Amino acid sequence: MNTSRTVFTAFIYFLLSTIITWWFVAVCPLYTSLQQKLLSTGIAGAKWSLQIAAAYFFMQAKKWDFIKNIGATCLVGSVILLPYAVLATWSNYNSGAFFVGSLLAAVITMIVLYFLNVKKLQLSYRWFWGWIFCLAIAITLQLTVVFSVIKF
């Protein structure tokens, strides 16, 4: 795949993922304000943006393939959130357990896909562990700043 097509594909993956993720957050009753929704979505976006920037600046030949593949990983994670978003929108089924379960399924799937992407492109496993570190920070921020579940 040529570079311009790869860049465009990555852009589409991340755009669709952002739209789906926003819908998921927008219909969840656990968020009590627009500020909370924006913060939550921003934290998720920052995690991916950091990975894109790192790949752009620190990778050479494989950077666009890697960025496209992590875009696909992000999109798959967001697609897993669709059943919750659809049911919450059209049937008013808004279970907190379904919300959390959807998130867990998405995160676990993305961890596996991210690892497989690193392996497929024969990158250093530091890329995978760097993403896990970003994920841990993002989850901590969600639980402390967005939901105040954990207080320091």
Image: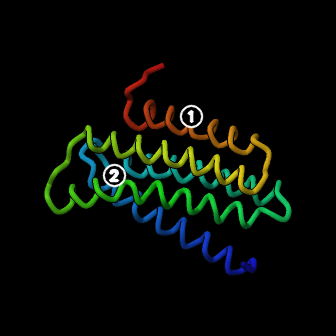
Q: Which residue is mark 1?
A: 136
Of label 1 and label 2, which has the lower sequence position?
A: 2
Mark number displayed over residue 34? 2
Judged from the image, the secondary structure of the residue bearing numbered disc 2 is helix
Residue 46: x and y in percent read 58, 50
- Look at label 2 and name its amino acid: Leu
Residue 20 against residue 50 in the figure, above or below = below
Residue 127: x and y in percent read 73, 45
Q: Residue at x 47, y 62 (%)?
A: 18
Q: Residue at x 25, y 39 (%)?
A: 96
- Look at label 1 and name its amino acid: Ala
Residue 60 against residue 110 in the figure, above or below = below
Residue 144: x and y in percent read 45, 30
Residue that sits furthest to the top in the current view? 152
Judged from the image, the secondary structure of the residue bearing numbered disc 1 is helix
Q: Residue at x 43, y 21 (%)?
A: 151
Q: Going by the image, does 146 lie left or right of 62? A: left
Residue 135: x and y in percent read 57, 40
Q: Badge 1: few (under 14), some or many (20 or more) residues near its Cα, within 10 Å? A: few
Mark number displayed over residue 147? none
